[in-house]
Amino acid sequence: MDTFLQQLINGLTLGSVYALVALGYTMVYGIIGLINFAHGEVVMIGAMVSLSVIMALLGAHAPLPSVVIILAGLLVAITVCMAIAYAMEKIAYRPLRKAPRLAPLITAIGMSIILQNLALIVWGRNYLTFPTLIQPTPYNVLGASMTDLQMLIVVLAGLLMAGLVFVVQRTRLGMAMRATAQNPQVAGLMGIDINVVISAAFVIGAALAAVAGLMVMTYYGIAHYYMGFLLGLKAFTAAVLGGIGNLAGAMLGGVLLGIIEALGAGYIGDVSNICGFPFLSDSLQQQCAASEGQVSMFGSNYQDVFAFFVLILVLIFRPSGLLGERVSERA
Amino acid sequence: MTTPLLELKDLQVAYGGIQAVKGIDLSVDQGELVCLIGANGAGKTTTLKGITGLQPIKSGKIHYAGEDITGKPAFQLVRKGLSMVPEGRGVFGALTIEENLAMGAYARDDRAAIKDDVERVFGLFPRLKERRKQTAGTLSGGEQQMLAMGRALMSRPKLLLLDEPSMGLAPLMVQKVFETVMAVSKEGVTILLIEQNAKLALEVSSRGYVMESGEITLQGKAKQLLSDPKVRAAYLGEAA
Ligand SMILES: Nc1ncnc2c1ncn2[C@@H]1O[C@H](COP(=O)(O)OP(=O)(O)OP(=O)(O)O)[C@@H](O)[C@H]1O
Ligand SMILES: [Mg+2]
C-alpha cells in the first residue's frame, strides 16, 4: 500500500510535467494537423537556458534570493523558447502548409535534430547538474512522502493548465483558435488571420514547454542536450493516449502516463520476481536464498518501457485516444 | 452611371491544370440582389473562392467598393464589409450557437452593438435563440443554414455572397431561406446569390447570370431570363 501511494505521488508529479509538454503537441496538432517532433527539444532548450541564467546569477557578486534567481531563469527561458517556436513555425513549417503531410513531418524531425545539435554546441555533451538552490523538504502524506518541490510542480502545472483552459474557452484568441482548428478557411472568412492563430499555438506551447523544462531539471537535478528526445516522445504518447488534438485529453493523458510509469517502475521488480516459480535451477535457488527471495528479471530501470507499451496499446485498441473523437472530421 | 459595388473583370481561376473559371465579367450594383445560376461544376463556387481569396486567381481583376481587392486574403475582406456564407454552411460544429455568432462579429469591436445584433439574428431565427447554448453540430441542416446566414450578418456586411443557401433543404426550409434573403436585401445589403434552384433565385433577384463550364453564357434582367427558352429548358426543367 505504501509503495502504491508513493508511486502515485511520484507519478502525479512527473505526469504534470508530461501534461504541460503534451499540451504543446496537441495544440499544434489540433490546429494544423502537424506532429511537431521538435517540441521535446524546446523543453530541453528551456531547461538549458534557465540553467545558464541561474548559474550566471549565482556567480554574480551580490547574492540574490534563490526564488529571484529561479524566476529570472524561468522568464528568460520562456522568452527564448517562445522566440524559437515562433521562428520555427515561420521558417520551417509555414512554407510547407499546403505540402503533403509527410513533408512537414520530416521537417519537424529535422528541426529536432538541428536544435539538439545547436544545444550540443552551446552546452556541450556532458550532463549538467542543477545547483541545489532548493532543498526539497519531504512531508508526510497519508504515510507516503511528498516533497514541497513535488507539490510546487503539481500545483504550478495545475494552475498553468487552468490558465490555458481559460484562454482557450473564454478569450477572443481562444475562440479564434478553436474556430481555426475546426475549419481554417471559414475562420479566415470570419476575419481571423489564421497565421496569427497558428503562431499563438506554437508560442503558447513553447512557454509551457519552458516551464516543464525547468521543472524536470529541478526534479531530477540534471540537464542534458538529449533530454528532450525521450521526454518529447513520452509527452507525445501522453497526447495520443488522451486523444491528440484534445486539450483535456493531453492533460489526462499526461497525468495517467506519469502514474502508469511510476506504478510500473514501482511494481515491476515484484511482478517479475522469479523466486516464486517452481522448477528453478539450483543457482537461481541459491540466489533467491541469498537475496531474501527477491530476484527480478526487470528492475525500475525499465521505467521508460511503459510509455511505449502504452503507445502501442493505444494505437492498436483506441487510436483516437481516451477523449478523442472519430478521426474522420477532417477530410 | 455609378460604379458597381463588386466588379469582376476577366476573372480566371484554375486548380492546377483544371481551368474552372475561364475569364468572366460580372458586376453587382449597390443594393442589388443578383443571382448566379448554373449546373453542377459550372464554376460558381470557384468564382466566389476567387473573390474571397480562398483560391488564388490566375488572372483578372476584382474591384470592390472602389478598391482593387485582387489577391487580398479573406480575413481582410470582412473588415471591408464583404462577407460570405460558404457552400455547405461551414458552421463551427464544436462551438455553441452563441460562439458561432460571436465569430461572425470577430472583426468588430463595438460590443454593445454586437449584443443588439445577436438579438436581431435571434429575432430573425427564433429557433437559434432556443438553442443558443447548444453546439452547432447538433443543429439540423436547415438550422445550420440559418446559423450560417446569421453569422454572416453579424459582420454587418455591405456585400453578402451566398453559396447555395437552399442546398439540401426541405421545401418549407427553402422558403424560409429565400424569405430571409429578401428581408436582408430589403435592409439594404447587396447580395450575390448562387443557386441551383434557378426558378426561386431568379424570382427574388433583379438580375441574373448563367454560368456554364466556367463561362457566363447568359445574363440580364431576372424576368427576362425566367422567360428565356434556353433557361427554361436547361434550368427550369421544361421541354424546349
Ligand atoms: N479543389 C479543387 N481541386 C480541383 N478541381 C476542383 C476543385 N474544386 C472544384 N474543382 C473543379 O472545378 C470545377 C468547378 O467547380 P465549382 O465547385 O466551382 O462548381 P459549382 O458551380 O460550384 O458546382 P456545384 O453547383 O456542384 O457546387 C469543377 O469541374 C470541379 O471539379
Ligand atoms: Mg458550388
Image: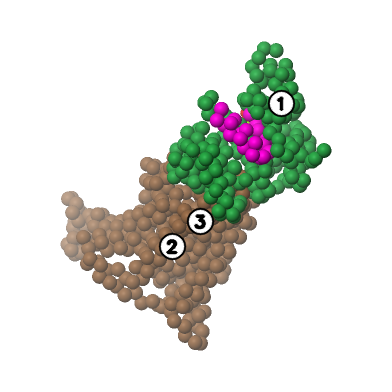
Q: Which residue is mark 2?
A: A160
Stretch of the chain drawn in magenta: B175-195
Q: Who's the residue at 74% across and 22% down the image?
A: B224
Q: CA distance from mark 3 to mark 1?
A: 46 Å
Q: Residues within 10 Å of mark 2 (few under 14, many from 20)?
A: some
Where ligand 1 lies, by image quadrant? top right
Q: Is the residue marked 2 within 8 Å of ligand 1, measured from its CB?
A: no
Say which chain tag 2 marks: A
Q: Quadrant of the N terminus of chain A?
A: bottom left
Q: In the rendered image, what is the letter of the chain coloured brown?
A: A
Q: Secondary structure at mark 3?
A: loop
**Image x and y of residue A284, in percent:** 21, 57
Does B2 sit left or right of A130 as displayed?
A: right
Say which chain tag 3 marks: A
Q: Amino acid at mark 1?
A: Ala
Report if the CB atoms under discs 3 and 1 are less than 8 Å apart: no
Q: Is residue B185 above or below residue B155?
A: above
Q: Residues within 10 Å of mark 3 (few under 14, many from 20)?
A: few
Report if the CB atoms under discs 2 and 1 are less than 8 Å apart: no
Residue B222, label in figure: 1
Q: Who's the residue at 29% across and 60% down the image?
A: A8
The one nearer the camera, A271 or B97, is B97
Specify how the rendered protein is coloured.
by chain
Q: CA distance from mark 2 to mark 1?
A: 60 Å
- Decide which of tag 2 and tag 3 comes sooner along the chain: 2
Q: In the rendered image, what is the letter of the chain coloured green?
A: B
Q: Which residue is mark 3?
A: A171
